Image (spheres, rainbow, N blue to C red):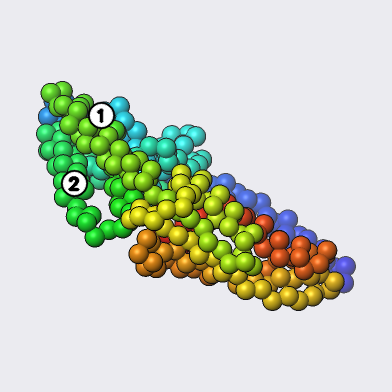
């Protein structure tokens, strides 16, 4: 047995150096790194006629978005983009093993779209990294931005609101203002593209639209009419509406709405806890008694101190819902 062990050890001692020498003699094959294209390293400079920008990303779509973001940034305006991903590379662009990626989306600024760009170059730069070179005609970009804003205001100003109730008019003005939330940045870009551009007309129209919204909001009032069981909920609804800058008043005209509250309660016990299982109905009507909206909530109040306190807990829970979801969702109103 020992003789067999000696033979095995001997074979191992002979073979091991041969294996080691064979490995040591193997030649490493190095793949030459492909140089970055000149248009990426030294892109064309923007001039009186054109804007140029390069961008990189994990795919063509992301690279394009980053290039367009940088293009607008050269005009002094930062924009946000859902594809605005920046790459941090520790040892050069091609060292993808040592690269870390992170998304940097600036949500504080509004997006400005560049739709009339040309894709001049597109190339794979490394592992899952792509680069693009884009160009945009300054005059065409200005005309596109001007046309977009002009058409937006024309659509808003030509809207027939005669069949809208007071709340619908308010929602229209609110949504219109939201659709123009990028206006200031766009006008800055346009002024940069065309030094003779006068933005005062667009700014005046925006100010007028904002005044319409504020005037309409000031006109609207609500009154709250709860049933006897729902009286504790009235103050919660009133508070929610006041927070949205609506007036609580008793009157009857085309700008007034009434919120009716009805509450049905079933009492129960669970492990010594009193439960007030409540169904709360909200119905909002206009001055003609026409239903504008309706909603139903199921709220269970609870207390270890009896049914009365459990019922009061329903109002507390309703208040939490108003704070979390907003009074509009509670009443099913677009406000």
Front-most of residues 3 and 122: 122
Q: Residues within 10 Å of mark 2 (few under 14, many from 20)?
A: few
- Would residue 276 appear left or right of 87 to someone viewing this image? right
User: Does residue 320 appear anywhere in the picture?
Assistant: yes
Q: Residues within 10 Å of mark 1 (few under 14, many from 20)?
A: some
- Would residue 69 appear left or right of 47 to someone viewing this image? right
Which quadrant would the N terminus be assigned to in this image? bottom right
Mark 1–mark 2 distance (CA, rounded to whole Å): 23 Å
| Residue at screen point 48% across, 43% down | 102
Front-most of residues 159 and 46: 159
- Would residue 200 appear left or right of 259 to someone viewing this image? left
- Residue ID for mark 2: 157
Q: Position of residue 71 (x, y in %)?
A: 27, 34
The furthest residue to the right: 2
Q: Position of residue 259 (x, y in %)?
A: 48, 61
| Residue at screen point 42% across, 41% down | 107
| Residue at screen point 39% across, 66% down | 289
Above/below status of 103 relative to 296? above
Q: Quadrant of residue 19?
A: bottom right
- Residue 188, label in figure: 1
Which secondary structure lies at badge 1? helix
Q: Position of residue 160 (x, y in %)?
A: 19, 55
Q: Looking at the image, is mark 1 or mark 2 nearer the viewer?
A: 2
């Amino acid at each position: 047995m020992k003789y067999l062990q000696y033979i095995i050890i001997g074979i191992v001692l002979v073979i091991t150096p041969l294996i080691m020498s064979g490995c040591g003699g193997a030649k490493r094959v190095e793949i030459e790194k492909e140089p970055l294209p000149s248009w990426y390293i030294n892109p064309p400079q923007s001039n009186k006629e054109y804007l140029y920008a390069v961008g990189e990303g994990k795919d063509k779509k992301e690279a394009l978005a980053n290039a367009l973001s940088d293009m607008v940034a050269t005009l002094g305006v930062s924009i946000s983009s859902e594809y605005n991903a920046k790459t941090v590379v520790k040892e050069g662009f091609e060292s993808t093993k040592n690269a870390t990626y992170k998304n940097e989306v600036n949500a504080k600024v509004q997006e400005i779209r560049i739709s009339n760009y040309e894709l001049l170059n597109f190339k794979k730069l490394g592992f899952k990294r792509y680069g693009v070179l884009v160009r945009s005609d300054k005059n065409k970009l200005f005309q596109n931005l001007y046309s977009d804003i002009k058409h937006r205001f024309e659509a808003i100003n030509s809207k027939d609101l005669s069949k809208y109730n007071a709340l619908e008019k308010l929602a229209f003005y609110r949504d219109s203002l939201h659709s123009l939330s990028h206006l200031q940045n766009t006008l800055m870009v346009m002024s940069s593209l065309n030094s003779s551009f006068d933005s005062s007309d667009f700014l005046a129209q925006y100010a007028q639209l904002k005044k319409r919204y504020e005037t309409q909001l000031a006109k609207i009032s609500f009154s709250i009419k709860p049933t006897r069981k729902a009286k504790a909920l009235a103050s919660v609804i009133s508070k929610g509406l006041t927070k949205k800058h609506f007036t609580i008043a008793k009157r009857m005209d085309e700008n007034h709405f009434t919120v009716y509250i009805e509450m049905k309660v079933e009492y129960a016990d669970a492990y010594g806890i009193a439960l007030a299982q409540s169904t709360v109905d909200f119905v909002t009507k206009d001055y003609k008694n026409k239903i504008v909206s309706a909603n139903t909530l199921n709220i269970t109040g609870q207390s270890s101190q009896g049914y009365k306190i459990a019922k009061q807990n329903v109002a507390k829970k309703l208040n939490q819902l108003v704070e979390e979801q907003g009074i509009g969702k509670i009443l099913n109103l677009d406000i």
